[in-house]
Amino acid sequence: MRSYGMYDMTRGLTLALFAGLVGVALWGAAQVGTQTSSRFWIAMAIVAAAGLLLTLANHVGTWTKGLRMRTSPGTFVLAFLPVLVCVGWILMASQPGHGWQEGRIDSWSSSIGILGLVHSVGLWRGVLAFGFGVMLGLSLDGVPEPMVAPDTPAYAPIPTRTEGTATADEPVTAERRWAVRRRESGTPAGTTRVPERTRND
């Protein structure tokens, strides 16, 4: 049974390190505060970066597994963009004071009857920002490196003999000719090959 002791220890230490960095980022966001509109958006950006950092911890060491990082277009369009719209909408509606587009978002939410829902979910705006960063990280994926075609073909053609030139595979070619003639004449497989007589004989 294969042992994963060293791998598990390395992965555990990596996740612990990233979790510590996430904690530092959240502490920094708390120091910035959300008293004003500008502070609010700075703090939310830090929290979103913490969510992204935690997700990227799962991709550390991807290159050691023969994988490369790429953005998954389907995941980005079908999962991340809807989250971006919803989180951005709620954060703009719940920002302190009269921030950027806050009045317009409140008016639109009231018109379509979701103002109460927006303000209720907006109480968890820190969680929304963190989840936004997580979704951004989940839109990344590790895929195998593309196979590169070799410079030379897998099966090189057998060199043929030209007039007046001897090749290294001549004995093999002669044996093949003898096998073909033996099959055509019905000679048993165990028959010893008789050298061909030349014209001078």
Image: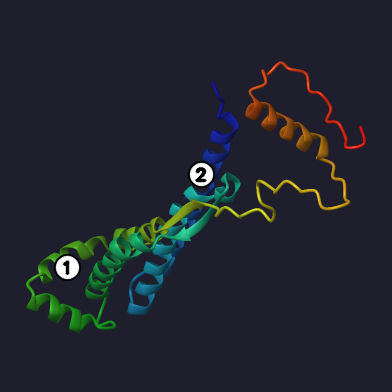
Q: Secondary structure at mark 2?
A: helix
Residue 79 rendering spot, x and y as whole percentages: 29, 60
Identify the disc placed on residue 159. none
Farthest residue, direction right = 200
Identify the disc placed on residue 118. 1
Q: Which residue lies under the disc numbered 2?
A: 16
Res 5 quadrant in image: top right
Q: Is residue 25 visible?
A: no
Q: Earlier in the sequence, mark 2 or mark 1?
A: 2
Res 185 quadrant in image: top right
Q: How many marks?
A: 2
Res 43 quadrant in image: bottom left
Q: Secondary structure at mark 1?
A: helix
Of 123 and 82, the residue lying toward us = 82
Q: Mark 2 to mark 1: distance in Å?
A: 35 Å
Q: What is the quadrant of the N terminus in the image?
A: top right
